[in-house]
Image: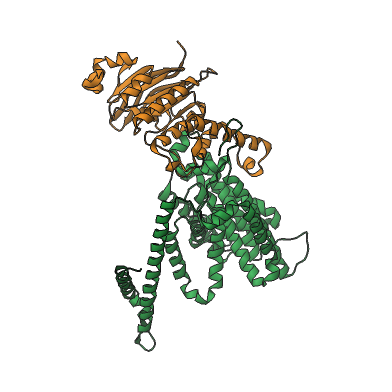
Amino acid sequence: MSEEILRVTGLTKNFGGIKAIDNVDLDIRSGEIVALIGPNGAGKTTFFNCLTGIYTPSSGDIHLRNPESGKETRLNGMKPNKITKIGMARTFQNIRLFPTMSVLENVMIGRHCRTKALILGAIFRDAATRREEEEILETSYDLLKIVGLKHQVNEEARNLPYGAQRRLEIGRALATEPFLLLLDEPAAGMNPQETEELVTLIRKICKEGHSILLIEHDMKLVMTLSDRIFVMDYGKKIAQGTPEEVRSNPAVIKAYLGEDVDA
Amino acid sequence: MFPLKELKRSLLISLWFAFLTFPIMVIKVDPIDRIVIWRWDNMAFVAIGSFVLSILIKVWILRKERRNLRKSTNRDITEPFVQRILREPRFLYPLCLGVLTFALLFPSLFSTYQTNIMITALMYVVLGLGLNIVVGVAGLLDLGYVAFYAVGAYSYALLNMHFGLGFWTVLPIGGLLAALFGILLGFPVLRLRGDYLAIVTLGFGEIIRLVLENWSAFSNGPSGISNIPRPSFFGMEMTFEGQIHYIYYLVVALVIFTIFVVNRLQNSRLGRAWLALREDEIACQAMGIDKTKTKLIAFSLGAFWAGLVGVFFATKTTFVSPASFSFLESAIILSIVVLGGMGSIVGVIFGALILILMPEYLRSLSEYRMLAFGGILVAMMIFKPQGIISNVRRSYKIKNKSTISE
C-alpha cells in the first residue's frame, strides 16, 4: 500500500445551527482515484471548500502530505492560495474560468504560484524573467495539448463549448503542479461521448502521478474510475470502500442509489 | 427604406423632449422687470433637433444591425480599424514616430498658452494610465484617486517649504509617499468589492482633502501653499516661456515612461494576476494567487503615478490648495478611464486628450460644457460600452519544437 497524502479526521463545519459536515473522516493514498458521492445537499462541495481553504472548518483536522518530500502540513485556517502552493488544486462545480481571458492565459494563471517575477522583473524584463515567461508559455501549451485544447489557444475562454470549459478548468488546475487534484462534478452537463473522453483524460492525469479526489453524480463514471468511494448523506459519512462494497452497502442503497443499483 | 412606424416614434420622442425641456428652455423669468419671457422658438429648436437626432440614431442602429447580419452569414471577422492598426507593427511604428515628432515639436508650433493646456492634458494621460491599473486592469473601483494626487502635490509643496528640497529630489519621494498611502488605503478595503469598495475609497479621498483643508498648522488650510519653485535644469536661469517648455518636455518624458512601464506590467505575470483578480476572485485564489499582495501592489502602483503627477502639478501651477483635489477631479479621471476603454492604454490616452482638450477648445460653449459632457458619457455607454478603443487581448504564437501549429 502506498502512503497517505491526505488525512481528514473528524471534520465538522457549522453554518449557524446547521451542521453541513458532521465528523467526517477521509483519507487518500498516493496514486489513487477516490470519489466522494452523495445525494444533493449532502455537503460534498462544502467538504471541498473546507479542504481548499475557502471555508475554515469548525473542528477537525486536515493534513496534507507531499509524497515526494514527505513534508506534512496542517491545512486548517490556511488561505486558499497557500494550500494550492503546497500542492492541492481544484476545479469548480459551476465553472469559474476567467471568461474574457484567452484559453492559454487561463492556464498561464495556474503557473502563477510556481513562478516569481514581480514588478521589477516585469519592467526590466531581465534574462531570468524572460526565461520564466518562456517556461510558463511552454508548460501551459503542453497542458493544453493534454486536455485537448491546443487549437483554441487564443480563443476567449467564455466562447468555448461547455465540455471544453470543463477540460480547460482541469488544465488550469494542473498548471499549479498539484499532487492531489480535486474535481467538483467534472462530468456535469457533458454528453456521453464527452464523458468518455473525460474518463480517458482523468486516467491519463492519474497515471502521470496526480492523485484525484472527485465529486460526481454520474454513477457509471464513478464506478469505472474510482479505486475507493466515500458516501456522504446529510453531512455525515455513511459508507466507504471499493465500488463493489459501496454498491452492495444497504445504507448507501437506502440513502442514495435506490433500486437502480444493479441496473 | 425608413419605416413609417419609426418616423412616428421619432415624432413622439421629439414631442416628449419638447415637453421635458419646456421649463428650462422656454420659460425665462426676468426678475428685474418682473415679467416672464416665453421663448417659443427654443421649443421649436429642441423639437426639431431631437426629431432629427432620433432618426439619425435609428438609421445608424438599423445599418449596424444589417451589417451584423451580413457578418454572421459571411463569417469574415473584421476587426475595428484602430485595432487593426495597433496590431500591425508596419503601421504602428511610423504612427508612434509621427505622434512623437508632433509631441516634440508642439511647443515651437503653438503658443505658450496651448503648450500649457497640453501639459495639463498630458498630466491627465498619466493619471488615467495610473488609475487604469487599479480600475481597468485589476477591477478595483477607486473613487478617491485624487487623494494620491494631492499627496504628491503636497509632499512637494511642504518638503520644499520646510526643507528646501528641489523638484528632482521630491519627484521620487512624492511618488513613493503616494504609493505608501495606496497601501494604507489598500489594507482596510482588501475584503471589499464593487459598490462597497467605491464608497470607502470615496471617503478616503474626502478625508485627505478635509485634513488638508482643516489642519492649518500642517498644510496652511484652504489658503494653500504658494511660491512653489519650478524645476531646475542644472541651475540654469530660464525665462517664463522656457520654463513652460521645459515642464512640457518633462511631462512628455513622464508620459513615455508611464506608457512603457504600464505596457510591460500588463503583459507580465503580475498583469495576468490582476486580470484574473478582476474576472473571478475566488478562482484566482484557488489558482494560488495571493489576493492581498496582488491588490496592494495594484493600489500602490496606481497611487505611485498619481503622486508623480501631483509633484508635476505643484511645480506647474506653483500653488496648491485643497480646492484642486475635489471629488470632481476623481470623477474626471475615472471618466477618462471608462470613456477611453478600461484596460486599454491607447484608449486611456485618447480619453484623456478628448476630455481635457475638448472643454478648452469649446470655451465658447462653456455654459453647456457639463451638458455636453453628460451627453457624451451617456451616448458612449449606449453605443460603445467598452470605451473608445477597447482592450485587445494579446494573442500568442506557438513555436513549439515538437508541434507545428498553424
B68 on left or right of B170: left
Q: Nearer the viewer, residue A91 or B189?
A: A91
**Number of numbered discs present?**
0
B311 on left or right of B3: right
Quadrant location, the C terminus of chain B: top right
Q: Which picture quadrant has residue B39?
A: bottom left
Q: Position of residue A249 (x, y in %)?
A: 26, 15
- Colour assigned to chain B in the rendering is green
Q: Residue at x 39, y 32 (%)?
A: A55
Q: Which picture quadrant has residue A36?
A: top left
Q: Which picture quadrant has residue A234?
A: top left
- Colour assigned to chain A in the rendering is orange
Q: Position of residue B369 (x, y in %)?
A: 48, 71
- Residue furthest to the top in view is A1
The answer to whether residue A93 is visible is yes
A188 on left or right of B171: left
The answer to whether residue B221 is visible is no
Q: Is residue B191 above or below residue A220?
A: below
Q: Position of residue B195 (x, y in %)?
A: 41, 51
Q: Residue at x 43, y 32 (%)?
A: A167
Q: Is residue B366 above or below residue B252?
A: below
Quadrant location, the N terminus of chain B: bottom left
Q: Nearer the viewer, residue B273 or B311?
A: B273
Q: Position of residue A81 (x, y in %)?
A: 49, 33
